[in-house]
């Protein structure tokens, strides 16, 4: 498994410093939050996009993906959502990012079949562009579709390899889904996995990995037994929790924790 962290944990940090953190702490890649607050966003100039590619190449760090904010199951017309998806895919293609993250985002009045159909229609409409650019769109297990079985239901309906799922372990846990159940649903569609840790369902302030209650050992054991060797990305949600400890001081121990869990899982898998 390859290790990465998300820039959500270091909001607004200049990319050279992000790359330096990755190399100093033994991470192979970085997930870039694509947002106007961040160095990477949809309105970047082509010149700046090319500079970002060079910065990561020179640092020997991979761009795992772009964490976008398009909501593919949201109420309303398709046009604005598809336009945002188009721009995200173009940005990912120019940065050499293999994945783009999107959210479900269905409203409370639009759950079930209607939300699934809306999300699948929009994802299918963007799939051809994704294929042309060599980018894969990942629907995150989040909000209205936080369970793996719910996200998998949508992408299976699309039926395109360019559309998969991003497994956020917090949200599948909040949905009451065991790692084995999540993996069974997502295995045909899995892009990569976001790991994190929190104190409880009522207190989701980010903690150091292993300091909370999320079933990280169970997740890695399930992935190892399946022979999965993709990205594990630590999404430390510092942006939303000012009181959380700074991520840079936790990165080294977090890498060690994930490596040890991975080794234990591989040993157990035989």
Image (cartoon, rainbow, N blue to C red):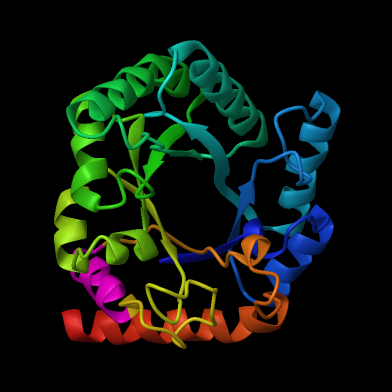
In the displayed structure, 226 sits above or below 116; it is: below
Where residue 145 appears, x then y in whole percent? 30, 44
Residue name at image x 52 percent, y 85 percent: 256
Q: Is residue 163 magenta?
A: no
Where residue 109 appears, x then y in whole percent? 30, 31
Q: Quadrant of residue 231?
A: bottom left
Residue name at image x 76 percent, y 45 percent: 37
Q: Is residue 78 left or right of residue 270?
A: right
Work out whether residue 73 or residue 57 is closer to the camera in this orientation and state it. 73
Q: Could you tell me which quadrant the C terminus lies in?
A: bottom left
- Residue 187 can be seen, yes or no: no
Where residue 96 appears, x then y in whole percent? 61, 36
Work out whether residue 215 or residue 28 is closer to the camera in this orientation and state it. 215
Work out whether residue 197 or residue 205 is closer to the camera in this orientation and state it. 205
Q: Is residue 268 left or right of residue 248?
A: left
In the displayed structure, 47 sits above or below 190; it is: above
Q: Could you tell me which quadrant the N terminus lies in?
A: bottom left
Q: Is residue 98 left or right of residue 109?
A: right
Q: Main secondary structure of the magenta part?
A: helix
- Residue 157 can be seen, yes or no: yes
Q: Is residue 225 left or right of residue 255?
A: left
Magenta stretch, residue numbers: 217-227
């Amino acid at each position: 498994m390859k290790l990465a962290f998300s820039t959500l944990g270091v909001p607004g940090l200049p990319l050279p410093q992000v790359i330096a953190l990755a190399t100093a702490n033994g991470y192979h890649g970085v997930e870039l939050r694509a947002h106007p607050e961040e160095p990477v966003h949809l309105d970047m100039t082509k010149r700046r996009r090319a500079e970002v590619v060079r910065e990561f190449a020179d640092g020997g760090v991979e761009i795992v993906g772009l964490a976008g904010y398009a909501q593919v199951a949201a109420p309303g017309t398709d046009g604005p959502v598809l336009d945002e998806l188009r721009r995200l895919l173009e940005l990912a293609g120019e940065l050499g990012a293999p994945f783009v993250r999107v959210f479900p985002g269905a409203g409370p009045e639009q759950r079930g079949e209607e939300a699934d159909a809306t999300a699948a229609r929009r994802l299918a409409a963007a799939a051809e562009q994704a294929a042309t650019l060599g980018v894969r769109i990942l629907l995150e297990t989040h909000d209205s579709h936080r369970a793996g079985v719910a996200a998998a239901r949508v992408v299976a309906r699309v039926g395109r390899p360019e559309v998969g799922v991003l497994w956020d372990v917090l949200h599948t846990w909040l949905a009451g889904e065991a790692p084995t159940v999540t993996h069974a649903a997502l295995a045909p569609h899995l892009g990569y996995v976001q790991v994190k840790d929190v104190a409880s369902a009522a207190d989701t302030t980010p903690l150091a990995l292993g300091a909370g209650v999320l079933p990280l050992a169970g997740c890695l054991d399930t992935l190892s037994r399946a022979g999965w060797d993709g990205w594990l990305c630590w999404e430390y949600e510092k942006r939303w929790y000012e009181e959380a400890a700074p991520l840079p001081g936790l990165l080294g121990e977090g890498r060690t924790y994930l490596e040890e869990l991975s080794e234990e899982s591989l040993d157990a898998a035989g």
